[in-house]
Image (cartoon, rainbow, N blue to C red):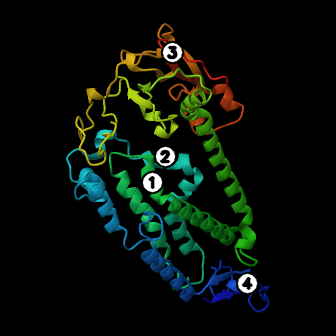
Amino acid sequence: MPLRFLAKREPDMAKAPFKGRSEAVNPTNAYEYGLSFPTGYTAFKALLTARIVSAIWSHISDCDETFNYWEPLPMVRIDSLYFGRLVAAPWNIVIYNVFTSHGPDLYGVEPWYFYLLNGFLNFNFIYISAMVTPAALWAVSKLVSVNARNPACLPYSLSILPLYLWLIVFTLQPHKEERFLFPVYPLVCLCGGLTVDAVQKLYFRLFVRSGQHYLHHTSHLVFPTVFITSLLGVTRILALYKGYHAPMDTYMELSKMTAEGNLPTLNYFNICVGKEWYRFPSSFFLPDDRWSLLFVKSEFRGELPKYFAQVDGTSVIPDHMNDMNKEEPTRYANLTSCHFLVDLDVSTSSEFEPNYSQQVDKWVLVKSIPFLDNQRTSKWLRSFYIPYIWEKNVVWGSYNLLQARKMRVQPSKY
C-alpha cells in the first residue's frame, strides 16, 4: 500500500511572504511540517480489508469492535437458545424504554443539566471546550482566513454532530445515568481538541499576525491546557479511590479470612446487606460457592435482584418479578440467617436502617474502613482531591464488616 512520505524543508519566506493568515495543513503544504500520511486509496483499502476479514473470520464480535456483518444472526440465535424462545434482546430494550407507559423513569429522574455537571466531573475543562466547539469553529471561519480543506476530509460538522445529537436525545429523557454518555466519550475528546486548535488559530490571528505556521507560535497554549486537564483528571481519580474504595476492600476481607482458615467449618455462609445493597461489587468478590448474598429490609422501596434458578436458570421465567420497580417482600431474609453483615456507619439510623455497628450484643466488628460521608462533605472535596485540605476537611463514615455473635470468627490479622 503506497504511503506518501514528505520530507521537511523550511519554507522560502522570500518567495512566500506571510499574508496574515493561518494555513491549514493539507497535502499541498504538509511537506513543510514533516508529515507522512496514507493516500485516500490506501486508507480505503485498509478499511475495506478490516471489514472483509471481520466478516469472514469473526464468528461473533463485540459491538465496539470492527463491525461484523454476521453478528446479528448469531446474537439472536444464542439469545433464543438460552432464553428458550425467540428473543432479540436489543428489541426488548427498545420496547420497554420507548413503547411502555412507565419505562426507565421508574428508576429515578434527573434535571436537564445533569449531563453538564457529570461531563465536567469526568472531563473537567475538556467537556466545557467540547460544548463550545461549534462556536469556536464559527469564529475561526469568520476571523481567520484559511486554505480550503482537502475534499477527502470529512467536514467538521459531520465529525462533531453525533456528540450533540446524542446529548440532545439523552438530555430529553427524564431518566439519566452517567453510563449513557460512555459511547460518546471519544467525541468529547475530539471536540475538546478542536476547540483548543481553534483557540490557537484565533490567538495567532489576533496577537501574532506574523511568522510561519500558527502551530509554531501557539504551542505555549497547548502545554498548560494538557497539564491542567490532566492534573484535574488525576485529582478526580484520587478523590474517587480514596473516598469510595472501601466496599471492595471490605468484601476482599472475606477471601483473606477464608484463606487464613479463620472461619468455622460450615456448608454455607450468608453475607447480608441492607442499605448498602447497591455497592455490592459482584459475586466475584465472594470467596467461593459456599457464600450467598442476602438482602435485609431497608428504606429502599424498589425491586431488588433475585438469584437465577438452579436448573435452566436462563430460560425459566422467575416468579415474584415485575416491570414497575415495585418492592418485592420475598427478597428479604431474616437477620437471624446472616453470618456476616455489611453496613455503613454514618451515625444515623431509622426504623429499617438501624445502626447495626452499635448493636454490640448481636454483632462483632471484624473490619472497618473509612468511607467518605457525601452528605456532610463539601461537593468540591467529594469531586476532587486536594492534598492536605482534603484530609483535613473530609467527613468520614465507617464501612463495616460485622460478624454475628452466634458464630465465632477470628478477625483477619491484617
Q: Quadrant of residue 62?
A: bottom left
Mark before the other along the chain sequence, 3 or 1: 1
- Residue at 70 percent of width and 61 percent of height: 221
Question: From where the camera sits, is residue 282 visible?
Answer: no
Q: Which residue is mark 3?
A: 357
- Using the image as rendered, state which of residue 208 and residue 285 is in the foreground: 285
Q: Which residue is mark 1?
A: 181
The reply to whether the C-beta atoms of the residues labelled 2 and 3 are less than 8 Å apart is no
For discs 1 and 2, the disc positioned in front in the rendered view: 1
The reply to whether the C-beta atoms of the residues labelled 3 and 1 are less than 8 Å apart is no
The reply to whether the C-beta atoms of the residues labelled 4 and 2 are less than 8 Å apart is no
- Quarter of the rendering occupied by the C terminus: top right
Q: Which residue is mark 2?
A: 118
- Residue at 72 percent of width and 31 percent of height: 388
**Mark 2 residue element:** helix
Question: From where the camera sits, is residue 198 visible?
Answer: yes
Task: Tell me: 176 left or right of 145.
Answer: left
